[in-house]
Image (tube, helix red, strand yellow):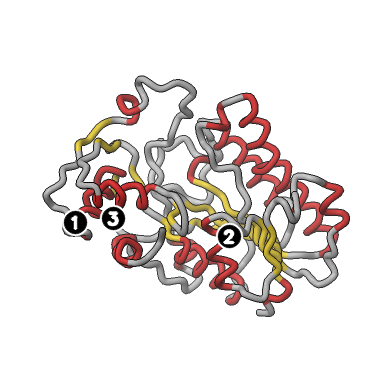
């Protein structure tokens, strides 16, 4: 593949940084360089040397999306901007790679298959679901649906590592179940789909392994760091957010069925393996 003809959108996010490292010759842009929610900006962009759009741009503040301002921003980036990219992809015959989320489901089924009907609970989830619908309107598309993304920058694992370093024993929700997805796994999967020219469509991607709660993942982090002296107290999502306002509903079951992408020859990595590599490395 000629990655010099790739356009990476959302280059400063966790996944965007990983994609930029994987495809060093690609054109990588953030919102300041190319606002994909602005049709005129996309019309003015030179598409003559682009064959693939890798859309890692997203509004990911789940609770912020419940505010008036956040609702507008979430829909602009997660839905309208994707529709704009679809128009461009259709016009120029480009391949669109778009990142979806487990939040497009209500979390009542497990594991989630690619064929499960969309059933978002929150504004964020609804905006991502709308983006999925839009991305599916271009023939040459890969919708990569993922969950619990961990990469370079602020995230759950970094927060728990910080608590461990301070010898703090936290209270963590135990009724949300899923698997971590490291950006290394996402990039590997995207590269596999493109290089193997797998059939276009939607593919679930997360690390494999036994599904776990956020509390159990915290225990695994502490164990890997040799912090077995610390305790993790279970709480429910309802209890954890009881005294907070403006909280978006979360899907309780986020585990994704990985059989479709594995059927293309992709080998998934256990999340505990990538977690160990992550917590022992420099990911600050």
Does the rendering let one see residue 141? no
Residue 116 x/y as whole percent: 51, 44
Q: Residue furthest left?
A: 229
> Image point 42% across, 51% down: which residue?
256
Answer with the quarter of the image where residue 88 lies: bottom right
> Image point 75% across, 70% down: which residue?
51
Residue 141 x/y as whole percent: 67, 60
Mark 1 vs mark 3, CA separation in Å: 17 Å
Q: Is residue 179 left or right of residue 221?
A: right
* Location of mark 3 (residue): 210
* Location of mark 1 (residue): 223
Mark 2 vs mark 3, CA separation in Å: 27 Å
Mark 2 vs mark 1, CA separation in Å: 30 Å
Residue 174 in the image: above or below residue 161? above
* Location of mark 2 (residue): 16
Q: Residue furthest bottom?
A: 1
Packing grade of label 3 (10 A; few <14, some 14-19, many >=20) is few
> Image point 58% across, 60% down: which residue?
16
The answer to whether the residues at label 2 and label 3 have Cβ atoms under 8 Å apart is no
Q: Which numbered marker is on residue 142?
A: none
Closer to the observer: label 1 or label 3?
A: 1
> Image point 80% across, 45% down: which residue?
38
Local SS, label 3: loop
């Amino acid at each position: 593949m000629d990655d010099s003809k790739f356009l990476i959108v959302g280059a400063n996010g966790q996944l965007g940084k990983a994609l930029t490292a994987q495809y060093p010759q690609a054109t990588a842009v953030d919102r300041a360089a190319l606002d994909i929610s602005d049709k005129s900006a996309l019309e003015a962009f030179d598409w003559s040397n682009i064959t693939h759009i890798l859309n890692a741009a997203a509004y990911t503040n789940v609770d912020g999306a419940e505010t008036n301002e956040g609702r507008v921003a979430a829909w602009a980036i997660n839905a309208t901007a994707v529709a704009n990219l679809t128009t461009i992809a259709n016009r120029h015959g480009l391949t669109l790679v778009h990142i979806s989320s487990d939040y497009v489901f209500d979390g009542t089924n497990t594991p989630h298959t690619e064929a499960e009907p969309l059933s978002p609970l929150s504004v964020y989830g609804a905006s991502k679901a709308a983006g999925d619908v839009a991305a599916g309107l271009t023939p040459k598309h890969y919708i990569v649906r993922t969950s619990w993304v961990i990469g370079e920058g602020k995230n759950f694992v970094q927060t728990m590592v910080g608590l461990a370093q301070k010898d703090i024993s936290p209270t963590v929700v135990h009724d949300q179940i899923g698997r971590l997805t490291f950006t290394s796994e996402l990039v590997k999967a995207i590269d596999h789909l493109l290089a193997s020219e797998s059939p276009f469509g939607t593919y679930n991607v997360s690390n494999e392994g036994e599904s776990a709660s956020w509390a159990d993942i915290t225990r695994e982090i502490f164990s890997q760091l040799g912090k077995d002296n610390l305790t993790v107290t279970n709480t429910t999502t309802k209890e954890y957010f009881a005294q907070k306002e403006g909280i978006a509903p979360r899907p309780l079951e986020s585990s994704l069925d990985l059989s479709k992408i594995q059927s293309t020859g992709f080998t998934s990595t256990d999340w505990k393996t990538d977690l160990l590599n992550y917590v022992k490395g420099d990911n600050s």
